[in-house]
C-alpha cells in the first residue's frame, strides 16, 4: 500500500504522468458519450465493426458496442497501475505506457466515427 501512496504523491507533481492519464480518460468519456448519443439503443442487431476493405464485417446486439470503451478503460487502468509495480522502471517506459493508453483511445474513437458515418448517418 505504501507504493501506491508514493506513486499517487508523485503523480500529482509530474505532468508527464497525469497529462496522458487525463487525456485518455477524457477521450474515453467522449467515446461513451458518442455511443449513447449517436447509436440507437434497440433490440435489433447493429454493425459493430467497419473496415474500408470489407465494409461492415461484424454485427451484434447494441450492448456489444460498449465492449470497445470498456476494454479501453481497462487498458487505461492497467497502464496506470503498471508503474506502481515497476517503481524502478525508466521514466520513458512509464511515459510510453501512459501515452499508449491515449493512442488506444484515439484509435477506438476514430473507428467509432467511421462506423457512425458509414452506417448511422
Image: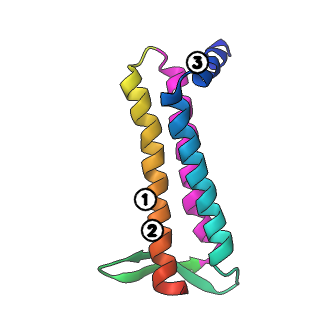
Q: Residue furthest left?
A: 53
What are the residue bounds of the magenta stretch?
A: 61-87
User: On the image, numbered disc 3 is attached to which residue?
Assistant: 10
Q: Quadrant of the C terminus?
A: bottom right
Residue 75 vs 112, above or below: the answer is above
In the image, taking residue 66 as reference, residue 58 lies left or right, namely left
Tag 1 and tag 2, C-beta contact below 8 Å: yes
Up the image or down, 82 lies above or below 31; here it is above
Name the spot of residue 114 as percent of width and height, x first.
44, 75
Q: Residues within 10 Å of mark 2 (few under 14, many from 20)?
A: some
| Residue 45 visible, this orientation | yes
Q: Which mark is residue 62?
A: none
Q: Nearer the viewer, residue 44 or 95?
A: 95
The residue drawn where x is 70% and y is 83% is 42
The alpha-carbon separation of the residues under discs 3 and 2 comes to: 34 Å
Can the viewer see residue 48 in this picture?
no
Q: Which residue is mark 1?
A: 107
Residue 70 part of the magenta segment: yes
Separation of marks 1 and 2 at Cα, in angstroms:
6 Å
Residue at image location 42% in from the left, 77% down from the top: 50
Q: Residues within 10 Å of mark 1 (few under 14, many from 20)?
A: few
Query: In which quarter of the view is residue 30 placed?
Result: bottom right
Relative side of 74 to 16, left or right: right
User: What's the residue at 60%, 50% (across, down)?
Assistant: 26
- 3D distance between C-alphas at marks 3 and 1: 29 Å
| Dominant SS type (magenta) | helix
> Of the residues under marks 3 and 1, which one precedes in the sequence?
3
Residue at the image point whose x is 47% and y is 20% from the top:
86
Residue 46: x and y, percent?
Answer: 57, 82
Residue located beneath label 2 in the image: 111
Q: Which callout, 3 or 2, points at the residue further toward the start of the chain?
A: 3
Amino acid at each position: 500500500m505504501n507504493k501506491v501512496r508514493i506513486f499517487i504523491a508523485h503523480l500529482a507533481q509530474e505532468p508527464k504522468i497525469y497529462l496522458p492519464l487525463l487525456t485518455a480518460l477524457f477521450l474515453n468519456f467522449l467515446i461513451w458519450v458518442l455511443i449513447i448519443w449517436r447509436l440507437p439503443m434497440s433490440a435489433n442487431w447493429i454493425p459493430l465493426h467497419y473496415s474500408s476493405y470489407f465494409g461492415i464485417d461484424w454485427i451484434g446486439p447494441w450492448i456489444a458496442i460498449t465492449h470497445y470503451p470498456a476494454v479501453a478503460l481497462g487498458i487505461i487502468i492497467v497502464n496506470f497501475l503498471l508503474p506502481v509495480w515497476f517503481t524502478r522502471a525508466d521514466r520513458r517506459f512509464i511515459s510510453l505506457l501512459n501515452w499508449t493508453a491515449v493512442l488506444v483511445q484515439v484509435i477506438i474513437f476514430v473507428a467509432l466515427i467511421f462506423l457512425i458515418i458509414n452506417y448511422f448517418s
